[in-house]
Amino acid sequence: MSVSTRTLRCQKYYQDREMIRAVRGGTDTLRAAGTKYLPREPGETADSYKRRLARSFLSNYTDKTARNLASKPFTRPIVVKSEKYQDLADQYMKAVDGKGSNLNGLCSTAFEDALWNGSSFIAIDAAVDGGRPYAYHLSGDHILGYKLDEDDRLTEIRIQEKAIVADGAWGEKEVSRIRVFKRDGEVVTWSLYDGDEGTDAAIVLDQPFALKEIPVVAVHSAAVISSGELFANPPLKDLVYMNIQHFQESSDQSNILKIAKCPILFASGVADDAEIAIGSEYAIKGDVNADLKYVEHSGAAIGSGRDSLRDLEAKMQSFGSDLLENSGAVETATGRALNAGENNNRIAMMALNLASAIEKVFGWIAYFNKISEPDFHVDINTEYGINTSSEEFTALANARTMGDLSQEDYLQELKRRGLLRNNFSLADNADRLSTELA
């Protein structure tokens, strides 16, 4: 087995997400896949299929849903707080990857990737000469193999790295490297191999790493199914299946519309060698009982296809709402309304997982900076829900009227539901009210 070969578990991860990568790649990727995601119909010629494929396009509801859900925790910026090392926190919040990207950009990328794939990763590294440490997003697609101890802590990981480098005076080429981290107790080493499959050529071997643990932390969309596993199930996979179905049905609908728009001239009782010309200045002479007419599609199947597409689109548009639904039993409308802002929906749980990962990353950054007792705390937005029905707004208003809910909490609940703007300030509102009532 080569250092660049995926293990069985990583190969399964990669294969299970093949359709996810195709939908994430959009129309161009699906067209390039050809019959894999758009089957060729029996009797359809190669040229006809090629034309149909070129007309087919993906309405990417999955991408829209992923982007919408991924934006929720970032409606206000992530804040990293520290009583002792706030200057260091501010420095890395502005440029966390050594390339000018801020912390929110890195976190947003990792969060959206976790929505697509179930798990995403953030890694940290530093130049061998002791340069400034930096964090970067690591996709599960680039993990070739890993080992965990009995506490599910990494003892080994192989990461595929690709980059475009100069090739001669004017050219460029893609190079592949395999980075390997190993941990034995609290001693971590790293190695680098040529990434060309089958070579196993070592570039650097068993170099000491500054941290006492492998510098890769996961951001999961859900709990990992069993011990010894590194990946969680992708939450949008069912939506991906529906999106592929929509791609296929949309292609069929477009194709049948193209055919149905062109009526077919039907002739019977006309001599085989009769010349038939179409136009306002022509007349056609036929034998007795000859018949000449246009045959058109009734349109019934087209209507059914359109209804099927609309039903499927409605399902896809509502799919992401499940990940925003609050869990836990609530018995009354007031209870449901007051529960909407609590951290008990899937996206909020993911956001808290991300916050924990960032705290670990800042702990590693602190270690590189010779800080022995870091006190970083990450604050991320989890105040969102979908309970926005008129019934629940009424319940909130009644609770306020009856004196069961303070004005501050009432306004906060309205803000959580999007009825008030994101930058609405309760304090400023109180100041303005005091001025108006004076």
Image (tube, grey):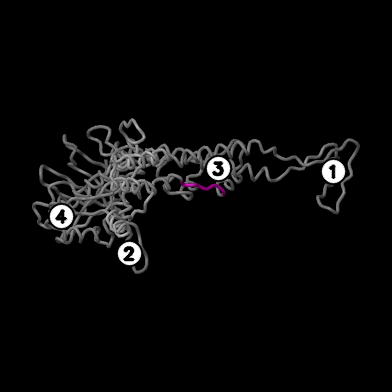
Q: Position of residue 427 (x, y in %)?
A: 27, 55
Q: Give neighbour class at mark 3: few <14, some 14-19, many 20+ (Cα, 10 Å).
A: many
Q: Residue at x 17, y 45 (%)?
A: 182
Count numbered badges in the picture.
4
Chief secondary structure of the magenta portion: loop
**Numbered tag placed on residue 82 in the rendering:** 4
Q: Give neighbour class at mark 1: few <14, some 14-19, many 20+ (Cα, 10 Å).
A: few
| Amino acid at the residue labelled 4 | Ser
Mark 4 secondary-structure assignment: loop
Mark 1 secondary-structure assignment: loop
**Mark 3 and mark 4 residues within 8 Å of each other at the beta carbon:** no
Q: In this rendering, which labeled residue sits more in front, label 4 or label 2?
A: 4
In which quadrant of the rendered image does the C terminus lie?
Answer: bottom left
In which quadrant of the rendered image does the N terminus lie?
Answer: top left
Please state the extent of the stretch shown in magenta in the rendering: 55-60
Would you place residue 70 above or below residue 369 in this image? above
Mark 2 secondary-structure assignment: strand
**Mark 1 and mark 3 residues within 8 Å of each other at the beta carbon:** no
Q: Give neighbour class at mark 4: few <14, some 14-19, many 20+ (Cα, 10 Å).
A: some
**Numbered tag placed on residue 273 in the rendering:** 1
The residues tagged by marks 1 and 3 sit, at their Cα atoms, a distance apart of 41 Å
The residues tagged by marks 1 and 4 sit, at their Cα atoms, a distance apart of 92 Å
The residues tagged by marks 4 and 2 sit, at their Cα atoms, a distance apart of 42 Å
Q: In this rendering, which labeled residue sits more in front, label 2 or label 3?
A: 3
The residues tagged by marks 3 and 4 sit, at their Cα atoms, a distance apart of 53 Å
State which tag comes first along the sequence, 1 or 3: 3
Q: In this rendering, which labeled residue sits more in front, label 3 or label 4?
A: 4
**Numbered tag placed on residue 250 in the rendering:** 3
